[in-house]
Amino acid sequence: MSVNTPDLSPFGVPRAGGTGAIGGLSASRIGYGAMQLERLRGDRDAAIAVLRRAVELGVDHVDTAQFYGDGFVNELIRDAYGPEDGVIVISKVGAEPNPAGPIPLRPAQRPGQLRASVEANLRSLGLEQIPVVNLRRLDTSPGIQASGDQIVDLDDQLAEMTALRDEGKIGAIGLSAVTLDGVRRARRAGIVCIQNLYSLVSRVDEDMLRLCVEEQIAWMPFFPLGGAFPTMPKVADDPTVIDIAKSLDVTPAQVGLAWLLRHAPNVLLIPGTASIDHLEENMAVAAIELDEAAMAALEGVASRTGSIPTFE
């Protein structure tokens, strides 16, 4: 294997999208979200091939969770990667499978449940330590909501996550689906990344992103192209995005991802797919050059859903 440099992934190829950071870890600015691999339950070899192709393209961090296929996706990651690949595994806790329910997930927010989920992740991933674990709060929509004993104070959860970090079971702590106040409260725990819903057309967390830029906290948006729910706008449907995509001979989705990389320096993408062709399209966004006119036009799109600060 090639000797790693700041511009190369541990696999020895240029980092996808260049080099960013998750806390003290260097990472490619484009990673891979593994959730959709659950769709390949009947074709394990195809799923492994997607994961292997990702590292060949310069990906060195993968987003997962025990509740993705009740451990199935974690097991794929365990089988696809060895220590020599240097892949940073980022998992999450705060929910658990609920196959018999109307929604296949249910909250698992109590401190004891967070600990049990970390232990389950360790077993299915075959790791002694998970490099980063995100605490999936239930503070924001869309998604499952907490009630009863699942309404847990953030400080109590962070105390458990910090204990798990001190024990060496997790390397660093992140937050997901959290409010701005939650991020402010969690800073003292040494949060390294935030995963919230965010895209060119869904920018209610712009102030949170600004705080994360200031605090050097990685911003890893989920649903980066919108459209995951019927009422959510889609980046690829916007006329301005479509026009810019045509002028560059790329897809509207690629424009949306390229804008995210340009918009703020701490953005790390984790687009998901179960297709190698789509994976390669996602990785190609690093080469898309959005000139100042295109960025101005895209910021105009974004201004309809939030403020448009500049991050320099």
Image (cartoon, helix red, strand yellow):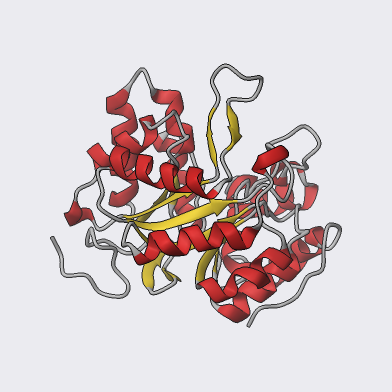
**83, above or below 311, in the image:** above
| Residue 268 visible in this rendered orientation of the protein | no
Residue farthest to the left, as pictured: 1
Viewer-proximal residue, 96 or 141?
96
Q: Residue at x 78, y 70 (%)?
A: 308
Viewer-proximal residue, 29 or 91?
91
**Residue 170: percent from the left, percent from the top?**
37, 58
**Residue 216: percent from the left, percent from the top?**
54, 77
The quadrant of the image that shows the C terminus is bottom right
**187, above or below 153, in the image:** below
**110, above or below 72, in the image:** below
Q: Residue at x 57, y 16 (%)?
A: 100
**147, above or below 222, in the image:** above
Where, by quadrant of the figure, is residue 12 drawn?
bottom left
Viewer-proximal residue, 27 or 73?
73
**Residue 129: percent from the left, percent from the top?**
29, 55
Viewer-proximal residue, 105 or 223?
105
Q: Residue at x 29, y 34 (%)?
A: 48
Q: Residue at x 28, y 50 (%)?
A: 56
| Residue 160 visible in this rendered orientation of the protein | yes
Left/right placement of residue 162 relative to residue 195 reads: left
